[in-house]
Image (tube, rainbow, N blue to C red):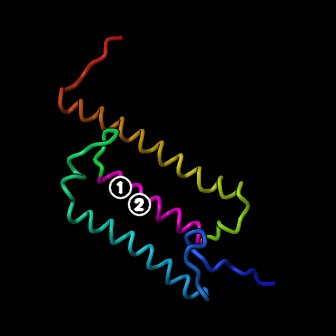
Amino acid sequence: MAHEHKLEIFRGLLKFRSNTQKIWGVLIFLSIVTAVEVALGITKPEVLTKNYFLGMKLLNWIFIILTLVKAYYIAWDFMHLRDEKSSLRRAIVWTPIFLVCYLIFILLFEADYIYNVFKDGFLSWDF
């Protein structure tokens, strides 16, 4: 027996009549998010490149967030996570989000250390 896929996206905000229409709708959404990323990467607005949040430019934060949104949505729709049990969905979604946040944390601290070494010269520790 074939399993019917849900034909709505954005938690039922947009409903489609067929799987083909849904695929086109998802493609358009992902294309818009990608176009926003590319446009921001080309124009690099001064407001987003001069202001910092947690040691990183706002533009970089926007890129990270939009990339996570695309990855989540691809997994949610194309890997059919919406049809799975909530515990499996949480395990699949929250684990990479936690690991990406951890990676960002490590990269920021390491980059700050390397920046300070280049700026102030080699620091020797006296144990």
**In front here: 114 or 10?**
10
Type of amino acid at the residue the image marks with label 2:
Leu
Identified at 42% across, 38% down, the residue is 106
The image position of residue 95, as x and y in percent, is 59, 50
Q: Are marks 2 and 1 in contact (CB under 8 Å)?
A: yes
Residue 26 — which label?
Answer: none
Pick out the residue farthest to the top. 127
Identified at 24% across, 45% down, the residue is 51
- Up-down: is 54 above or below 93? above
Q: Rounded to the nearest whole Å, what is the CA distance between mark 2 and mark 1? A: 6 Å
The residue carrying mark 1 is 62
Label 1: element kind: helix
Task: Report the number of discs.
Answer: 2
Identified at 18% across, 26% down, the residue is 120
Type of amino acid at the residue the image marks with label 1:
Ile
Q: What stretch is highlighted in magenta?
A: 59-78
- The quadrant of the picture occupied by the C terminus is top left
The 10 Å Cα crowd at callout 2, few under 14, some 14 to 19, many 20 or more, is some
Query: Is residue 69 found inside the magenta-colored segment of the image?
Result: yes
- The answer to whether residue 103 is left or right of residue 16 is left
- Up-down: is 18 above or below 82? below
Prevailing SS of the magenta stretch: helix
The 10 Å Cα crowd at callout 1, few under 14, some 14 to 19, many 20 or more, is some
Query: Is residue 44 found inside the magenta-colored segment of the image?
Result: no
- Up-down: is 26 above or below 21? above
The residue carrying mark 2 is 66
- The quadrant of the picture occupied by the N terminus is bottom right
The image position of residue 111, as x and y in percent, is 31, 38
